[in-house]
Amino acid sequence: MKLNRIVSLFSLLIIGLSAFAQYEDQRIVSSYYEFEEGSTELLYGDNVVFRSGPSSSSKAIDTLEIATEIKIIQKSDEKAKMNGLEWNWYKVKIGRKTGYILGGLIALDHIRRDDVLFLVTMAGINRNSDDYEYVDYKVRTRMIRADGEYYGHESDLNTNAFYIEASNNRGLDGVYNILCINLFAEACGVDGGKIYLFDSGERLIEALQLVSVSDAGAFWYTEEVIFPDDEHGWDGIVRYEREQGEYLNDELYWTKATIHTLNLKWEGDHFTPNIKEFEFGEGE
């Protein structure tokens, strides 16, 4: 029994180190994210008022356009609410000018894909349910085209933390770029997954929202997709895979799982069939 505990602890350590290695090159952002001093960031907001002090009543120094580069000098203790969330003011430098910008107007992260730029930030809505209050988090995305035009989208978040990745159309006709918002599950039983936003050339479309959740020793549920250009991908088809299972006996590594696969076709602004409405059968 003692040996089994040692082996289990060692296994957990290896899993933890593997998870850390998986995310160490990613910027995981949340409503609590703080910009590092000396970092170069981009504005999410457009026509942002650059102020002389950490207050919306401070004198305006300049008005700045979306994606303007700023250098973070210092986080202020002063805060203000914006889009349902509380943000710190930041002392920043733009060229030779120094002033203040509210954190909610700075992109939490950004990523370039060829000649387009993706920017993300967050919003929140306070909710009341029985005896407790909670925040319904949203991720807001803007994509700036090469000609300077931009459009955006707001998606629901199952968690308060995420990181982003961008790619080409991965073999899908009618799609120019894809942004993947990876939902970061910080603990067992917390929903993770992915949100896929497709750039149609005219707007961002929320094409898929996939769930991934597990509780060690109890159950797991995962959704994944394989695009046409991925290994084992099929031309013109996105392959959807759903797996759910339960742990029956830890010592014997005895598990039971059910796997469903489904072919999805992109129709220009949605997939058919709709996986949220598709009837997978009994027990789903």
Image: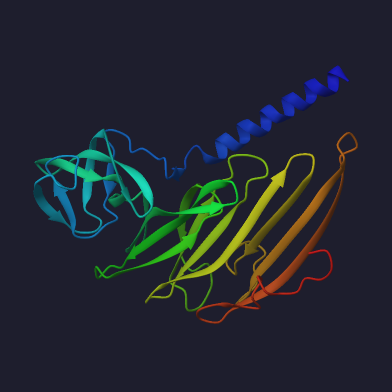
Is 258 situated above or below 191?
Answer: below
Relative to 37, 84 lies left or right: right
Q: Nearer the viewer, residue 36 or 158?
A: 158
Coloration of the structure image: rainbow
Report the number of discs.
0
User: Furthest residue to the bottom?
Assistant: 267
Is 96 situated above or below 168?
Answer: above
| Residue drawn at x 25%, y 56% as measured from the top left | 67
| Residue drawn at x 67%, y 50% as measured from the top left | 213
Q: Nearer the viewer, residue 278 or 68?
A: 278
| Residue drawn at x 44%, y 45% as measured from the top left | 30
- Residue 237: image quadrant is bottom right
Relative to 207, 67 lies left or right: left
Q: Where does residue 99 sit, x and y in percent of width and height? A: 14, 41
User: Furthest residue to the top?
Assistant: 2
Q: Where does residue 52 sit, x and y in percent of width and height? A: 11, 42
Considering the image in quadrants, where does the C terminus appear?
bottom right
Relative to 198, 12 lies left or right: right
User: Furthest residue to the front?
Assistant: 131
Considering the image in quadrants, where does the N terminus appear?
top right
Q: Where does residue 3 sit, x and y in percent of width and height? A: 84, 19
Is 164 situated above or below 11?
Answer: below
